Image (cartoon, coloured by chain):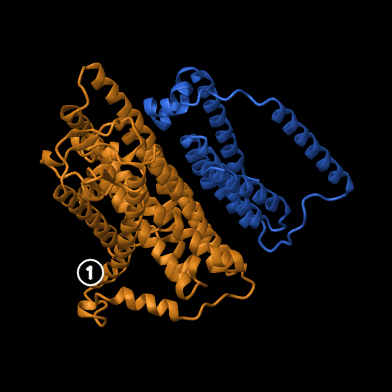
Chain colours: A orange, B blue
C-alpha cells in the first residue's frame, strides 16, 4: 500500500475530522456525567439517577435545560466580550485534539490512513499555543461581566495560567530532549521502541501532571472559581448555554490533558509487551514493522481510550479528595517549587544523557532504564523534601525538636 | 487565484483591519484583543510561508503570554478610570503623523527592493531533513550561539533588575 491519492486524502481528512470531533463531544458529555457520578460515590450520595437507567441520559437533559434557559446579560457588561468569552474559551479546548494520534494506522483499499486529524510538523507546540489562548476566555469573561467577583476570578485565572504555563512548557523539555522531536506520532513510536516515557521521565511526569491540573483550573487549583471566596469566580454572571460552554471547555481541557498524559508518558496507543502494533510509516509511504490490520487499529484505540479514561478518573478523584489551595500557596508552588526544580531537573537529565552517550549506550531499553534509575533517586529526594518530615519522620521529628513544633502551633 | 493566495489575502486583510481597529479603540481592553487578532493573523501568514515553528512561537509567546500580561496590567490599572485618548494636543498629533509617514516611506523603499526568493524546494527539503524546530534551532545554536547566550544573560539581568525594583519598599 502506498501513500493516499489527493482525493482519498481529502475524503479521509473530512471523515477523520467528523468522527474524531463528534466522538470527542460525546466523550466530553460523558465526562460531565462521570464527574457527578464519581463525586456522588466519593461523598456517599446517589448522584444523578432520574433520567434514564442510572441517570445516563443526564447530559442530554442538561443540554436541553441550558438551551431553554433565559440568557441574562448583566447591566454595564461589555456585550461583545461577554458574548465572545465562552466561545474563546471553548475553541482551543476542542481544536487541540487534532494533533493527538488516537490509534495505529488503519489500512483501507486506498492506502494507509493515519488516525490523527493533522500530523503537524510542530506537533506539541501547537498544543502549547492553543492552551495558552484558553486563558483569554476566562479573563475576558471575568472582566466583561462588570462584577467584582467575576473580575477577581478573571485576574486570578490569568495570573495562575501564565505561571503554570511556564512550568508546563519546562516539564515537557525532557521529552523533547529524549525524543529529539516534537511531533506526537514520532514520540509514540519511540516509546514503542524503548520504554514508556513515564519510567525514564518519572519526575517530568509528576511535574507535568501538577502543572496541567493548574492549567485546566481543576481542583485543587480551581482558584478562578473558588466558590467559598468568589461566589462562582469568572462565570458568576453567566447563565444558560454560555455558562454551559465554560463548563464544556473545562471538561474538554480535562479530556485533552488526560489524552496528552497518555500520549507523552504512557505510550499513546501502544499496547505494552506486544510487537503486533509497532507499525511505522516511512517517508515514502512504505510500512515499517508489523502489518497493519483493522483489528489492530481497534485494539490500539481501546488501549488509548483506556489510558485516557484512567487519567480522567484521576482528575475527578483528585478534585473531590484534595481541598483547595490558598491562592498564595498556588503561586508559591508554581514559581518557587515547580519552576526552579524543573530547571535543575533539565540540567541533571541533560548531564545524564550526555554521560550515557559518552559511555556508548544507544537509545533503547537499557538507556531508558538507566535514566529511570536516576529519576527514581530524584523522585525520592523531591518527595522527601516536599514532605518536610511530616509523614516519613512523623512523630519522631516533633519529639526530637519539641520547642520548634510548639512555636509553630 | 489559487487557494493559498485566497488564504493569504484573508489573513493579511484581517491583520491590517484589526491593527487599525487596535489603534482606534478607546478602551484598552478592546485594543489588546485586536492586537491578539493581528498577531494571530500574522502567525497564519507565517504558516503559509512554511515557517511553522515561527508561527507557533508567535502564538505561544506573543498572543499567549505577553498579551495576557498586557491584559492583566490594563485590567488592574484602568479600574474605574475613564478611557482618555493617549495622544493629547496638536503637537503630538503632528509628531505621530510624521512618524507614520516615515514608516510608510520605509515600506515603499522595501517594496522596491524585493529580495530574491530562496530556492523553491529549500524549505521543504529543510523541513524533511531537520523538522520544523531543527530548522530554526540548528543555525541558532551553532552559528549564532554567542549572540543567543549574550541575549539570555541580558534578559536575566533585566529580570533581576525588575525584581529588585519591585522588592524595594517605597
In this orientation, does residue B136 appear?
Answer: no
- Of residues B156 and A113, the one nearer the viewer is A113
Residue depicted at 47% across the width and 54% down the height: A134
As drawn, the residue found furthest toward the bottom would be: A50
Residue B57 % position (x, y): 49, 38
Q: Quadrant of the C terminus of chain A?
A: bottom left
- Near-viewer residue (A198 or A8): A8
Identify the residue at horizontal 37%, vertical 48% (top origin). A10
Instruction: Name the residue located 38 percent from the left edge and 75 percent from the top edge.
Output: A63
Query: Does A358 sit left or right of B11 as displayed?
Result: left
Q: Mark 1 belongs to which subunit?
A: A
Q: Quadrant of residue B92 in the image?
A: top right
Residue denoted by label 1: A42
Image check: A155 left or right of A44?
right
User: In which image quadrant can residue B124 be found?
Assistant: top left
x, y (%) of residue A402?
28, 50
Residue A304 appears in the picture as rendered? yes
Q: Quadrant of residue A347?
A: top left
Q: Residue at x 51, y 54 (%)?
A: A158
Q: Nearer the viewer, residue A247 or B169?
A: A247
The number of callouts visible is 1
The answer to whether residue A376 is above or below residue B140 is below
Amino acid at each position: 500500500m502506498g501513500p493516499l491519492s489527493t482525493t482519498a486524502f481529502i475524503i479521509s481528512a473530512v471523515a477523520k475530522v467528523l468522527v474524531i470531533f463528534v466522538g470527542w463531544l460525546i466523550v466530553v458529555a460523558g465526562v460531565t456525567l462521570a464527574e457527578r457520578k464519581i463525586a456522588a460515590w466519593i461523598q456517599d450520595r446517589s448522584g444523578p439517577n432520574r433520567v434514564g437507567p442510572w441517570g445516563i441520559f443526564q447530559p442530554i437533559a442538561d443540554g436541553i435545560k441550558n438551551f431553554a434557559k433565559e440568557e441574562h446579560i448583566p447591566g454595564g457588561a461589555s456585550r461583545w466580550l461577554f458574548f465572545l468569552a465562552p466561545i474563546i474559551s471553548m475553541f482551543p479546548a476542542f481544536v487541540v485534539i487534532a494533533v493527538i494520534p488516537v490509534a495505529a494506522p488503519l489500512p483501507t483499499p486506498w492506502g494507509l490512513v493515519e488516525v490523527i486529524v493533522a500530523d503537524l510538523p510542530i506537533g506539541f507546540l501547537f498544543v502549547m499555543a492553543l492552551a495558552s489562548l484558553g486563558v483569554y476566555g476566562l479573563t475576558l469573561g471575568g472582566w466583561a461581566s462588570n462584577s467584582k467577583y467575576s473580575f477577581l476570578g478573571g485576574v486570578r485565572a490569568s495570573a495562575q495560567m501564565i505561571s503554570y504555563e511556564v512550568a508546563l512548557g519546562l516539564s515537557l523539555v525532557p521529552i523533547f530532549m529524549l525524543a529529539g522531536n516534537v511531533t506526537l506520532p514520532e514520540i509514540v513510536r519511540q516509546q514503542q521502541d524503548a520504554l514508556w516515557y513515564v519510567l525514564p521521565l518519572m519526575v517530568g511526569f509528576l511535574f507535568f501532571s501538577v502543572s496541567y491540573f493548574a492549567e485546566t483550573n481543576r481542583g485543587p487549583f480551581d482558584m478562578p472559581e473558588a466558590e467559598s471566596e468568589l461566589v462562582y469566580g469568572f462565570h458568576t454572571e453567566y447563565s444558560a448555554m454560555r455558562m454551559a460552554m465554560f463548563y464544556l471547555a473545562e471538561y474538554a481541557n480535562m479530556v485533552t490533558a488526560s489524552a496528552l498524559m497518555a500520549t507523552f508518558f504512557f505510550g499513546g496507543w501502544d499496547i505494552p509487551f506486544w510487537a503486533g502494533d509497532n507499525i511505522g510509516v516511512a517517508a515514502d509511504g512504505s510500512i515499517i514493522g508489523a502489518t497493519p490490520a483493522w483489528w489492530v487499529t481497534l485494539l490500539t484505540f481501546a488501549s488509548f481510550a483506556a489510558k485516557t479514561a484512567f487519567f480522567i478518573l484521576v482528575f475527578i478523584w483528585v478534585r473531590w479528595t484534595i481541598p483547595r489551595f490558598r491562592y498564595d500557596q498556588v503561586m508559591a508552588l508554581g514559581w518557587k517549587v515547580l519552576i526552579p526544580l524543573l530547571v535543575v531537573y533539565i540540567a541533571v537529565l541533560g548531564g545524564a544523557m550526555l554521560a550515557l552517550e559518552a559511555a556508548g549506550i544507544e537509545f533503547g531499553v537499557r538507556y531508558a532504564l538507566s535514566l529511570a534509575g536516576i529519576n527514581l533517586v530524584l523522585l525520592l529526594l523531591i518527595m522527601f523534601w516536599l514532605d518536610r518530615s511530616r509523614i516519613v519522620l512523623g512523630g519522631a521529628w516533633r519529639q526530637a525538636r519539641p520547642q520548634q513544633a510548639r512555636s509553630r502551633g | 487565484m489559487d487557494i493559498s493566495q485566497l488564504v493569504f489575502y484573508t489573513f493579511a486583510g484581517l491583520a491590517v483591519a484589526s491593527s487599525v481597529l487596535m489603534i482606534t479603540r478607546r478602551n484598552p481592553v478592546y485594543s489588546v484583543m485586536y492586537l491578539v487578532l493581528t498577531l494571530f493573523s500574522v502567525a497564519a501568514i507565517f504558516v503559509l510561508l512554511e515557517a511553522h515553528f515561527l508561527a507557533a512561537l508567535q502564538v505561544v509567546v506573543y498572543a499567549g503570554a505577553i498579551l495576557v500580561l498586557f491584559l492583566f496590567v490594563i485590567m488592574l490599572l484602568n479600574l474605574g478610570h475613564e478611557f482618555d485618548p493617549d495622544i493629547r494636543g496638536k503637537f503630538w498629533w503632528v509628531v505621530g503623523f510624521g512618524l507614520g509617514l516615515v514608516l510608510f516611506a520605509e515600506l515603499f523603499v522595501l517594496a522596491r527592493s524585493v529580495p530574491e526568493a530562496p530556492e523553491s524546494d529549500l524549505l521543504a527539503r529543510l523541513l524533511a531533513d531537520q523538522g520544523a524546530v531543527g530548522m530554526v534551532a540548528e543555525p541558532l545554536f551553532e552559528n549564532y550561539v554567542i549572540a543567543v547566550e549574550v541575549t539570555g544573560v541580558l534578559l536575566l539581568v533585566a529580570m533581576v533588575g525588575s525584581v529588585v525594583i519591585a522588592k524595594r519598599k517605597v
